[in-house]
Amino acid sequence: MPPTATRPPSAQGVTGPLLTPRILRTVGPAILVVTALVALVAGLAFGGGAAGLQLGDAGPIVRWGLPTAKLIVNLAAAGMVGVLVTALFTLRAGEREFDVALDTASIAAAVFTVAAGATGFFTFVSVLNPALDAGPVFGQQLGRFLVETEVGRTWLITTVAGAMLTVLTFAVRSWPATLFVTAAAVAALVPMGTQGHSGDDAFHHEAMMALILHIIGAAVWVGGLLLLVVVRPLLSRDRLADVVARYSSIALAAFMLVAVSGTVRAAIGLQDWTALLSPYGTILAVKVLALIALGFLGAWYRARLIGTMRDSDRIGRSFWMLVFFELAVMGLASGAAAALARTPPPNPTPLPETPSPAERLTGAPLPPELTIDRWFTAWNIDLLWAVVAAFAVFFYLAGVWRLRRRGDTWPVHRTIMWVLGMVLLVWVTGGVVNVYQDYLFSMHMVGHMLLTMAIPVLLVAGAPVTLAARAIRKREDGTRGGREWILWTVHSPVARILTNPFVAAGLFIGSLWVFYYTDLFRWSLYDHLGHQWMITHFLITGYLFVLSLIGVDPVPYRLPYPGRLLLLIGIMAMHAFFGIAIMMQEGLMIPEWFGAMGRTWGATPLEDQYAGGGIAWSIGEIPTLILAITVAIQWSRSDDRETKRRDRHADRTGEAELEAYNARLQKLAASDARHGG
């Protein structure tokens, strides 16, 4: 265990007698909670979110208790996820402040667990309105609700995940373990985003993904600010200035995520501008104004205060007063968000009373016939991958700009490749492929081939790890920033295994058979989270395979060029066999899906499946051929470099090696002549 740290002398008195660190640690979270509760009560009263029902009303305790419990879940999630994320990027493992951060996350996880359990119970009572007693009938009803219904399973999983995170955050102290716990904590927030009053909305998937991103972004943002308040007494003025500056970068990214996802979610809920005059629109306006205020506040102290915190106690006092105000505004936004979740939107877009087969399966109407012009005009943006691509392009270009500003060079073609790869990713996940892949197996296969083969070729050519290692500033104080975490990931034992050429090739080709001939394919069709997993899986396996063949970024081991070509030829053969196997299949894959859409245009489902197999066999080989050509070019250039290296060595040594070799041959010839004589 690390020694107990004492309060640094330079930290004493920075905030003045009225804002001592102990007061900050106590009052800061209290301000957040109190303002959130006040905003929740006002929002529920104004919007009617806690109004009684004419039939099946569960009573005022449930009507007010359910949104209150959800609010506590959201705030505790921030104290769990945001604290962990900020600690990983701002604090040193093994020191007192890092341990305090993990203890804080453990306490927040415990509150999260209790509040999630209470939310599940209140939801059960609100939905079924059972007679409350201690008898076996009530227990059986509760058990069936938690196991057999989607909303019940959601809160059961969330509660169990919270309990596990409570133990893990208390037990771990190392950097790698904390990283995995942080990933688990972020994943624990995903089920909450699948619930809401948008389940019967025609834009259910879009609303769900926007809500998931909104919850995660808000948790990171609010929790990071709470961590600053908690560790304030343990840091010197200089260390505190560094932590605040690093948190401000995290908060900026979280703010952008919250703003974008909130805008999408609001657009789905409102549908038109006249809805702003409704109670739902008014509460939403309060939340938006709070978000704008937080954005301006963050930009102001990032530009004016953070850089000068080391110089003046007065600036430190001003900063912490702003922290108080920011926590209050965050509480206002959190309470308004919780009230908004209980307030019905004014103009929902429900599914028809008699939905078509396609609407029953996908939740959206059947699109019109696929024509040539729709390859360019049909769009259904996937918010998750649009956000991923936007951040990826922004940080890549920022890295290139930083290199050139200090006089270093970066190949233009690598930048072009990276940007094209991200543009293609957005088109595949949000363009015509995304619009038609649920209805046409052939279009699904087009998306698969691009995700697993074409996009990785472009992204690997961008060499993002090499750029990050050169552009991101190296930390000298023992903490880990983006550069340190990226390099740690690249050199981790897991990366050594996954980037092994044979493992990468096995994952690449094996996942084809496992995915399409198991229930994973069915899961990706019926569950939107399964669809997102499919995209992630094929993108990663394709990237690892391409990286093992032609990547510039460092990996522990690569095959010699002849071995790479042989491996690639073998993969091409197995990939072609996979496509032929689909073409030869006599029955439909997932017949209750592709055969039940009620589609009256285009090829029959079986003919379309045959075309999909042909795409996997023929079109899918085009990127493979590009890979083979690239490997051959790299091989040729490698030989040229080796020849030039030997020539330069010969020039430096004056052909000494060749002369020594010739002299040795002459001696052997003379010896043979003597023995022959």
Image: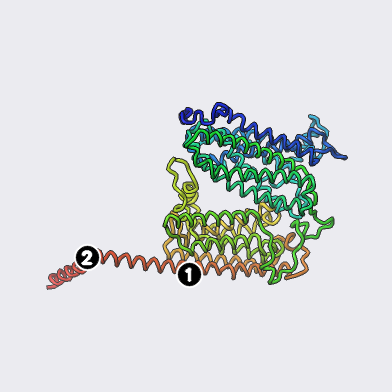
Q: Is residue 118 above or below residue 586?
A: above
| Label annotation for residue 656 | 2
Between residue 42 and residue 430, name the one nearer to us: 42
The colouring scheme, among rainbow, by chain, secondary structure or one colour, is rainbow
Q: Residues within 10 Å of mark 1 (few under 14, many from 20)?
A: few
Name the spot of residue 588 as percent of width and height, x first: 71, 64
The earlier-in-sequence mark between 1 and 2 is 1
Are the residues tagged 1 and 2 within 8 Å (C-beta)?
A: no
| Label annotation for residue 367 | none
Name the spot of residue 636 as percent of width and height, x first: 40, 69
Q: Which residue is mark 1?
A: 629
Q: Secondary structure at mark 1?
A: helix
Cα separation, mark 1 vs mark 2, equals 38 Å
- Look at the image and tell me whether residue 187 can be seen: no
Q: Amino acid at mark 1?
A: Ile
User: What residue is rendered at 23% in x and 65% in y?
Assistant: 657
User: What residue is rendered at 48% in x and 69% in y?
Assistant: 629
Q: Amino acid at mark 2?
A: Ala
Between residue 185 and residue 463, name the one nearer to us: 463
The answer to which image quadrant residue 129 occupies is top right
The C terminus: image quadrant: bottom left
User: What residue is rendered at 67% in x and 34% in y?
Assistant: 33
Between residue 121 and residue 469, name the one nearer to us: 469
Q: Secondary structure at mark 2?
A: helix
Name the spot of residue 149 as percent of width and height, x first: 75, 44
The answer to which image quadrant residue 645 occupies is bottom left
- Look at the image and tell me whether residue 433 can be seen: yes
Name the spot of residue 491 as percent of width and height, x first: 45, 49
